[in-house]
Amino acid sequence: MTDNKELLIKWAKAAGIRALKTAAQAAVALLPTTAVALGEINWGIVLSTAVVAAITSMLTSVGGIPEVADGESPLIG
């Protein structure tokens, strides 16, 4: 396995974990907000917000992620 491939695997794992954590945080933060504002939990809004947060996290990680190789991204350069 080449060094770049190993770096890409480490990056994907770290970025995926970060994206899942971000999605969970967004969903948990939105639960009481939708419950108070709408009188019930709108799961569609919660899920779509979590998905957008995860996608944004992955795109942000393309620029680099501190958990992997001094923050460098294998996708750039």
Image (tube, grey):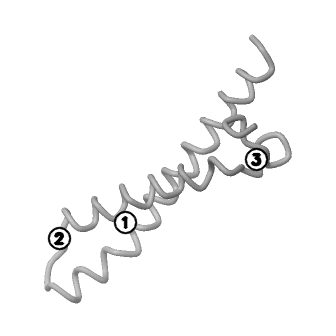
Residue pointed to by mark 1? 27
Q: Which residue in the structure is indicated by mark 3?
A: 67
> In the image, what residue occupies the spot 44% across and 58% down?
23
Q: Which mark is residue 12?
A: none
For the point 53% across and 49% down, the residue is: 58
Residue lying at the far top in this picture: please name it. Answer: 1
Looking at the rendered structure, the kind of residue marked 2 is Asn
Residue 25 in the image: x percent, y percent?
Answer: 47, 66
Labels 1 and 2 touching (C-beta < 8 A): no
Three-letter code for the amino acid on which mark 1 is drawn: Ala
**Quadrant of res 45:** bottom left
Tell me the CA gap for discs 3 and 1.
Answer: 24 Å
Q: Examine the rendered structure and indicate whether residue 12 appears above or below residue 42.
A: above
Q: Nearer the viewer, residue 58 or 29?
A: 58
Sequence-first tag of 3 and 1: 1
Q: Residues within 10 Å of mark 3 (few under 14, many from 20)?
A: few
Viewer-side residue, 26 vs 73:
73
Name the side, left or right, on which 55 lies relative to 63.
left
Image coords of residue 14 (percent x, y): 64, 42
Measured from the top left, where is residue 74 in percent x and y? Answer: 72, 35
Image quadrant holding the C terminus, namely top right
Q: Secondary structure at mark 3?
A: loop
> Percent x, y for residue 47?
28, 59
Q: Is residue 77 above or below residue 67?
A: above
Q: Earlier in the sequence, mark 3 or mark 2?
A: 2
The residue under label 3 is which amino acid type?
A: Glu
